[in-house]
Amino acid sequence: MITSSNIHRLTHGNGHASGWALLAICSTLGAAGCGDATDTGDSVGSGGAAQASGGATLGSGGDSNTASGGSIMSSGGASGGESNQGSGGLTTSGGSGSGGDVGSGGAESLDPSELIDGLDGYLYKGACDGGNASFECPLSACQGGVFTEDVDFAVSGDEGKIYEITMHIYGVVELRDDYTGGMRRQGNTSNNESMADFWYTGGKYTPGAGYNVYGLRVEPAVDGEPVTDNGNNYFLNARDSSPEGHEVYKLDYEVTIPVPAGGKVSFKAYDPNCLQIMNNEETVRPNGSGTGPNGSIVISEVDSAMPSPDGFVQPLSSGNNRTGQWIFIDVTQVAVKP
Protein backbone atom coordinates (compact mmCIF):
# COMPACT_ATOMS: atom_id res chain seq x y z
CA MET A 1 0.00 0.00 0.00
CA ILE A 2 1.37 3.44 0.85
CA THR A 3 4.79 3.95 2.34
CA SER A 4 6.30 6.94 4.00
CA SER A 5 8.38 7.57 0.91
CA ASN A 6 5.41 8.55 -1.19
CA ILE A 7 3.33 10.41 1.35
CA HIS A 8 3.95 14.09 1.80
CA ARG A 9 1.83 16.20 4.12
CA LEU A 10 2.42 19.70 2.88
CA THR A 11 1.51 21.62 5.98
CA HIS A 12 3.49 24.46 7.51
CA GLY A 13 3.04 26.68 10.53
CA ASN A 14 3.11 30.43 11.05
CA GLY A 15 -0.53 30.74 10.08
CA HIS A 16 0.17 30.56 6.35
CA ALA A 17 -1.16 28.14 3.78
CA SER A 18 1.44 26.16 1.92
CA GLY A 19 1.83 22.98 -0.06
CA TRP A 20 -1.47 22.12 -1.64
CA ALA A 21 -2.84 25.22 -0.01
CA LEU A 22 -0.48 27.19 -2.22
CA LEU A 23 -1.94 25.41 -5.11
CA ALA A 24 -5.18 26.81 -3.89
CA ILE A 25 -3.73 30.17 -3.20
CA CYS A 26 -2.20 31.35 -6.39
CA SER A 27 -1.80 28.48 -8.74
CA THR A 28 -3.16 27.54 -12.04
CA LEU A 29 -5.66 25.57 -10.07
CA GLY A 30 -6.47 28.63 -8.07
CA ALA A 31 -5.45 31.67 -10.04
CA ALA A 32 -8.53 33.65 -9.19
CA GLY A 33 -8.34 35.82 -6.12
CA CYS A 34 -4.55 35.78 -5.86
CA GLY A 35 -2.37 38.06 -3.85
CA ASP A 36 -2.59 38.22 -0.08
CA ALA A 37 -5.93 36.52 -0.21
CA THR A 38 -7.25 35.86 3.27
CA ASP A 39 -9.89 33.28 3.95
CA THR A 40 -12.90 35.15 5.17
CA GLY A 41 -14.72 31.96 5.99
CA ASP A 42 -18.40 31.22 5.68
CA SER A 43 -20.91 29.36 7.79
CA VAL A 44 -18.57 26.43 7.56
CA GLY A 45 -15.58 28.52 6.93
CA SER A 46 -15.14 30.25 10.22
CA GLY A 47 -11.81 29.60 11.75
CA GLY A 48 -8.24 29.76 10.61
CA ALA A 49 -7.57 32.07 7.68
CA ALA A 50 -5.49 30.80 4.82
CA GLN A 51 -3.08 33.51 3.72
CA ALA A 52 -0.72 33.52 0.85
CA SER A 53 0.83 35.85 -1.63
CA GLY A 54 2.53 35.56 -4.95
CA GLY A 55 1.63 33.50 -7.95
CA ALA A 56 2.62 29.98 -7.08
CA THR A 57 1.59 27.25 -9.41
CA LEU A 58 0.61 23.77 -8.46
CA GLY A 59 3.84 21.94 -8.68
CA SER A 60 6.51 24.57 -8.19
CA GLY A 61 9.19 23.80 -5.64
CA GLY A 62 9.71 25.26 -2.23
CA ASP A 63 7.66 25.13 0.92
CA SER A 64 6.78 28.70 1.76
CA ASN A 65 3.71 30.78 0.98
CA THR A 66 5.60 32.88 -1.50
CA ALA A 67 5.30 32.70 -5.26
CA SER A 68 7.52 29.63 -5.47
CA GLY A 69 5.69 27.50 -2.93
CA GLY A 70 5.31 23.78 -3.61
CA SER A 71 1.73 22.94 -4.39
CA ILE A 72 -0.30 20.35 -6.14
CA MET A 73 -1.78 20.97 -9.48
CA SER A 74 0.38 23.02 -11.71
CA SER A 75 3.78 23.92 -13.06
CA GLY A 76 7.37 23.34 -12.07
CA GLY A 77 8.94 20.83 -9.76
CA ALA A 78 6.47 18.15 -10.69
CA SER A 79 9.01 15.80 -12.14
CA GLY A 80 11.79 14.19 -10.20
CA GLY A 81 12.35 11.26 -7.92
CA GLU A 82 8.75 10.13 -7.88
CA SER A 83 8.94 8.35 -11.23
CA ASN A 84 9.91 4.75 -11.63
CA GLN A 85 10.49 4.46 -15.34
CA GLY A 86 11.49 1.57 -17.49
CA SER A 87 11.23 -1.12 -14.86
CA GLY A 88 10.68 -3.84 -17.40
CA GLY A 89 7.67 -5.67 -18.70
CA LEU A 90 4.48 -5.56 -16.65
CA THR A 91 2.50 -8.64 -15.78
CA THR A 92 -0.60 -9.06 -17.92
CA SER A 93 -3.67 -11.18 -17.48
CA GLY A 94 -4.93 -11.33 -21.03
CA GLY A 95 -7.73 -9.51 -22.80
CA SER A 96 -9.82 -7.26 -20.65
CA GLY A 97 -13.15 -7.90 -22.37
CA SER A 98 -15.05 -5.98 -19.69
CA GLY A 99 -15.39 -2.28 -19.04
CA GLY A 100 -15.80 -0.22 -22.18
CA ASP A 101 -14.19 2.64 -20.31
CA VAL A 102 -10.76 1.13 -20.97
CA GLY A 103 -10.39 1.92 -24.62
CA SER A 104 -11.29 -0.64 -27.25
CA GLY A 105 -11.85 -4.29 -26.46
CA GLY A 106 -9.03 -6.77 -26.16
CA ALA A 107 -6.59 -4.58 -24.24
CA GLU A 108 -4.31 -6.52 -21.93
CA SER A 109 -5.12 -6.06 -18.26
CA LEU A 110 -2.11 -5.17 -16.10
CA ASP A 111 -1.44 -5.60 -12.40
CA PRO A 112 -2.20 -2.23 -10.74
CA SER A 113 0.41 -2.82 -8.04
CA GLU A 114 3.12 -3.19 -10.67
CA LEU A 115 2.19 -0.10 -12.66
CA ILE A 116 1.24 2.31 -9.86
CA ASP A 117 1.82 0.82 -6.45
CA GLY A 118 -0.38 2.09 -3.61
CA LEU A 119 -3.18 3.75 -5.59
CA ASP A 120 -5.37 0.65 -5.56
CA GLY A 121 -6.85 0.55 -2.07
CA TYR A 122 -5.79 4.07 -1.09
CA LEU A 123 -7.94 5.41 1.76
CA TYR A 124 -8.06 9.09 2.72
CA LYS A 125 -9.41 9.66 6.22
CA GLY A 126 -10.37 13.14 7.39
CA ALA A 127 -10.68 12.42 11.08
CA CYS A 128 -12.40 14.91 13.36
CA ASP A 129 -10.34 16.52 16.09
CA GLY A 130 -12.92 17.44 18.71
CA GLY A 131 -15.27 20.38 18.26
CA ASN A 132 -18.71 21.12 19.66
CA ALA A 133 -20.87 22.05 16.66
CA SER A 134 -23.50 19.58 15.57
CA PHE A 135 -22.71 19.87 11.86
CA GLU A 136 -18.95 20.44 11.59
CA CYS A 137 -15.66 19.54 13.25
CA PRO A 138 -12.01 20.59 13.08
CA LEU A 139 -9.67 18.36 11.10
CA SER A 140 -6.66 16.80 12.75
CA ALA A 141 -3.12 17.50 11.48
CA CYS A 142 -3.79 21.12 10.58
CA GLN A 143 -1.10 23.79 10.62
CA GLY A 144 -1.91 27.48 10.88
CA GLY A 145 -5.61 26.81 10.47
CA VAL A 146 -5.11 25.04 7.13
CA PHE A 147 -5.20 21.36 6.18
CA THR A 148 -3.40 19.91 3.17
CA GLU A 149 -2.61 16.37 2.13
CA ASP A 150 -0.56 15.39 -0.92
CA VAL A 151 0.05 11.72 -1.69
CA ASP A 152 2.12 10.78 -4.77
CA PHE A 153 1.93 7.48 -6.64
CA ALA A 154 4.75 6.82 -9.13
CA VAL A 155 3.84 5.33 -12.50
CA SER A 156 6.26 2.74 -13.86
CA GLY A 157 5.66 0.95 -17.16
CA ASP A 158 7.39 1.04 -20.54
CA GLU A 159 8.92 4.34 -21.58
CA GLY A 160 6.76 6.32 -23.98
CA LYS A 161 3.55 4.40 -23.28
CA ILE A 162 0.30 5.83 -21.95
CA TYR A 163 -1.79 3.68 -19.63
CA GLU A 164 -5.48 3.92 -18.76
CA ILE A 165 -6.42 3.48 -15.11
CA THR A 166 -10.04 2.71 -14.30
CA MET A 167 -11.02 3.47 -10.71
CA HIS A 168 -14.13 3.27 -8.60
CA ILE A 169 -14.31 6.27 -6.29
CA TYR A 170 -16.15 5.84 -3.00
CA GLY A 171 -16.51 8.32 -0.17
CA VAL A 172 -18.50 10.71 1.98
CA VAL A 173 -17.59 14.35 1.41
CA GLU A 174 -18.82 17.91 1.29
CA LEU A 175 -19.14 19.42 -2.19
CA ARG A 176 -17.42 22.49 -3.65
CA ASP A 177 -19.04 24.89 -6.12
CA ASP A 178 -16.22 26.95 -7.64
CA TYR A 179 -14.31 24.58 -9.92
CA THR A 180 -13.98 26.47 -13.19
CA GLY A 181 -12.42 26.03 -16.61
CA GLY A 182 -13.28 22.33 -16.85
CA MET A 183 -16.37 20.16 -17.12
CA ARG A 184 -18.63 18.56 -14.51
CA ARG A 185 -19.54 15.13 -15.83
CA GLN A 186 -23.15 15.48 -14.64
CA GLY A 187 -23.42 18.98 -16.06
CA ASN A 188 -25.86 21.02 -13.99
CA THR A 189 -27.84 18.02 -12.85
CA SER A 190 -28.83 18.67 -9.26
CA ASN A 191 -26.73 17.19 -6.49
CA ASN A 192 -29.58 14.94 -5.36
CA GLU A 193 -30.04 13.57 -8.89
CA SER A 194 -26.35 13.21 -9.81
CA MET A 195 -26.27 9.48 -8.95
CA ALA A 196 -23.44 10.05 -6.44
CA ASP A 197 -21.21 11.19 -9.36
CA PHE A 198 -19.45 14.50 -8.74
CA TRP A 199 -16.47 14.08 -11.11
CA TYR A 200 -15.00 17.21 -12.73
CA THR A 201 -12.35 17.14 -15.48
CA GLY A 202 -9.79 19.95 -15.88
CA GLY A 203 -9.89 23.47 -14.53
CA LYS A 204 -8.98 25.14 -11.26
CA TYR A 205 -10.59 26.67 -8.15
CA THR A 206 -10.58 29.93 -6.23
CA PRO A 207 -8.02 29.95 -3.40
CA GLY A 208 -8.31 30.79 0.24
CA ALA A 209 -11.99 30.23 0.98
CA GLY A 210 -14.83 27.81 0.46
CA TYR A 211 -15.40 24.16 1.18
CA ASN A 212 -12.96 21.27 0.92
CA VAL A 213 -11.12 20.50 -2.31
CA TYR A 214 -10.46 16.87 -3.28
CA GLY A 215 -8.61 16.08 -6.47
CA LEU A 216 -6.25 13.95 -8.52
CA ARG A 217 -3.42 15.34 -10.62
CA VAL A 218 -1.46 13.58 -13.37
CA GLU A 219 2.04 14.80 -14.25
CA PRO A 220 3.34 15.29 -16.84
CA ALA A 221 0.23 16.13 -18.83
CA VAL A 222 -1.22 13.57 -21.22
CA ASP A 223 -2.17 14.86 -24.66
CA GLY A 224 -5.89 14.95 -25.31
CA GLU A 225 -6.81 15.80 -21.72
CA PRO A 226 -7.38 19.35 -20.40
CA VAL A 227 -3.99 20.75 -19.37
CA THR A 228 -3.27 22.96 -16.38
CA ASP A 229 0.39 23.94 -16.37
CA ASN A 230 1.82 20.67 -17.70
CA GLY A 231 -0.53 18.50 -15.70
CA ASN A 232 -4.06 17.10 -15.86
CA ASN A 233 -6.40 18.05 -13.02
CA TYR A 234 -9.44 16.09 -11.91
CA PHE A 235 -11.74 17.01 -9.01
CA LEU A 236 -13.83 14.50 -7.09
CA ASN A 237 -16.53 16.61 -5.39
CA ALA A 238 -18.03 19.19 -7.78
CA ARG A 239 -21.51 20.33 -6.81
CA ASP A 240 -24.16 21.83 -9.06
CA SER A 241 -24.60 25.59 -9.37
CA SER A 242 -26.32 25.88 -6.00
CA PRO A 243 -24.48 27.60 -3.12
CA GLU A 244 -22.33 25.51 -0.82
CA GLY A 245 -23.98 24.37 2.38
CA HIS A 246 -23.71 22.22 5.48
CA GLU A 247 -24.13 19.01 3.49
CA VAL A 248 -22.31 15.78 2.74
CA TYR A 249 -22.95 13.41 -0.16
CA LYS A 250 -21.95 9.90 -1.11
CA LEU A 251 -19.29 9.39 -3.80
CA ASP A 252 -19.93 6.20 -5.79
CA TYR A 253 -18.79 6.31 -9.43
CA GLU A 254 -16.26 4.97 -11.91
CA VAL A 255 -13.73 6.95 -13.96
CA THR A 256 -10.89 6.21 -16.37
CA ILE A 257 -7.87 8.50 -16.67
CA PRO A 258 -4.72 8.26 -18.83
CA VAL A 259 -1.30 8.32 -17.15
CA PRO A 260 2.20 8.39 -18.66
CA ALA A 261 4.93 5.85 -17.91
CA GLY A 262 7.51 7.55 -15.71
CA GLY A 263 5.03 10.11 -14.41
CA LYS A 264 2.92 10.24 -11.27
CA VAL A 265 -0.61 10.52 -9.99
CA SER A 266 -1.19 12.65 -6.89
CA PHE A 267 -4.15 12.65 -4.51
CA LYS A 268 -4.78 16.13 -3.13
CA ALA A 269 -6.92 17.35 -0.24
CA TYR A 270 -7.14 20.98 0.86
CA ASP A 271 -9.24 22.67 3.56
CA PRO A 272 -8.64 26.43 3.83
CA ASN A 273 -10.02 26.75 7.36
CA CYS A 274 -9.49 23.32 8.93
CA LEU A 275 -13.24 22.71 9.39
CA GLN A 276 -15.20 19.97 7.69
CA ILE A 277 -18.87 19.06 7.54
CA MET A 278 -19.58 15.92 9.53
CA ASN A 279 -21.45 12.83 8.35
CA ASN A 280 -24.68 12.64 10.33
CA GLU A 281 -28.45 12.95 10.08
CA GLU A 282 -28.31 16.76 10.12
CA THR A 283 -25.95 17.03 7.15
CA VAL A 284 -26.56 13.95 4.95
CA ARG A 285 -28.14 14.62 1.57
CA PRO A 286 -30.50 13.65 0.12
CA ASN A 287 -32.32 14.09 3.41
CA GLY A 288 -32.82 10.85 5.26
CA SER A 289 -30.62 8.78 2.93
CA GLY A 290 -28.14 7.83 5.62
CA THR A 291 -28.55 4.28 6.87
CA GLY A 292 -25.71 4.17 9.38
CA PRO A 293 -25.39 5.20 13.02
CA ASN A 294 -26.86 8.61 13.80
CA GLY A 295 -28.23 8.84 10.25
CA SER A 296 -24.78 8.72 8.65
CA ILE A 297 -23.92 7.53 5.14
CA VAL A 298 -22.26 4.11 4.94
CA ILE A 299 -21.20 2.39 1.69
CA SER A 300 -21.18 -1.37 2.14
CA GLU A 301 -19.59 -2.05 -1.28
CA VAL A 302 -16.25 -0.79 0.06
CA ASP A 303 -15.95 -3.94 2.15
CA SER A 304 -16.03 -6.04 -1.03
CA ALA A 305 -13.31 -4.09 -2.84
CA MET A 306 -10.02 -5.83 -3.61
CA PRO A 307 -8.04 -4.92 -1.66
CA SER A 308 -10.46 -3.78 1.01
CA PRO A 309 -9.42 -1.12 3.52
CA ASP A 310 -8.19 -3.10 6.50
CA GLY A 311 -9.76 -2.12 9.78
CA PHE A 312 -11.87 0.67 8.30
CA VAL A 313 -15.15 1.10 10.14
CA GLN A 314 -17.95 3.31 8.83
CA PRO A 315 -18.80 5.99 9.62
CA LEU A 316 -15.31 7.39 10.25
CA SER A 317 -15.69 8.22 13.93
CA SER A 318 -13.42 9.86 16.46
CA GLY A 319 -15.88 9.19 19.28
CA ASN A 320 -18.61 11.35 20.77
CA ASN A 321 -20.49 11.32 17.41
CA ARG A 322 -17.66 13.19 15.64
CA THR A 323 -17.83 11.61 12.18
CA GLY A 324 -15.46 12.82 9.47
CA GLN A 325 -15.13 12.57 5.69
CA TRP A 326 -13.30 9.87 3.73
CA ILE A 327 -12.43 8.76 0.18
CA PHE A 328 -11.49 5.27 -1.02
CA ILE A 329 -9.98 4.44 -4.44
CA ASP A 330 -10.54 0.97 -5.91
CA VAL A 331 -8.55 0.42 -9.13
CA THR A 332 -10.55 -2.03 -11.24
CA GLN A 333 -8.54 -2.09 -14.46
CA VAL A 334 -5.19 -0.99 -15.88
CA ALA A 335 -4.38 -1.30 -19.58
CA VAL A 336 -2.16 0.22 -22.26
CA LYS A 337 -4.00 3.05 -24.01
CA PRO A 338 -4.78 1.97 -27.58
Image: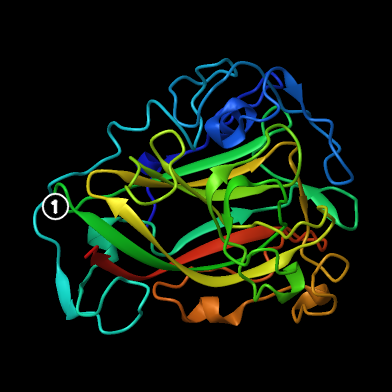
Residue most toward the left?
88
Query: Which amino acid does the dot numbered 1 rest on?
Result: Asp
* Residue at figure coordinates x 52%, y 64% from the top left: 328
Which secondary structure, mark 1? loop
Above or below, 67 relative to 173: above
Residue drawn at 87 percent across, 57 percent down: 135
Q: Quadrant of residue 209?
A: top right
Left or right side of 28 for 152: left
Residue nearer the viewer, 322 or 152: 152
Residue at the disc numbered 1: 158
- The answer to whether residue 148 is above or below residue 34 is below
- Rendered image coloring scheme: rainbow
The answer to whether 54 appears left or right of 225 in the picture is right
User: Split into 4 quadrants, where in the image is the C terminus?
Assistant: bottom left
Q: Nearer the viewer, residue 109 or 84?
A: 109
Residue 287 appears at what percent x and percent y? 85, 75
Q: Position of residue 115 (x, y in %)?
A: 24, 57
Taking depth in this image into account, of 136 and 76 the one nearest to the observer is: 76
Which residue lies at the image location 65% right of the left edge and 76% below the top edge? 195
- Residue 47, located in which quarter of the rendered image? top right
Question: Around disc 1, counting alpha carbons within 10 Å, would you say few (fewer than 14), some (14 to 19), or many (20 or more)?
Answer: many
> Which quarter shows the N terminus?
bottom left
Name the residue at 22% across, 50% down. 156
Q: Looking at the picture, how far across and down is residue 43, in whole percent? A: 89, 45
Residue 105: x and y, percent? 24, 79
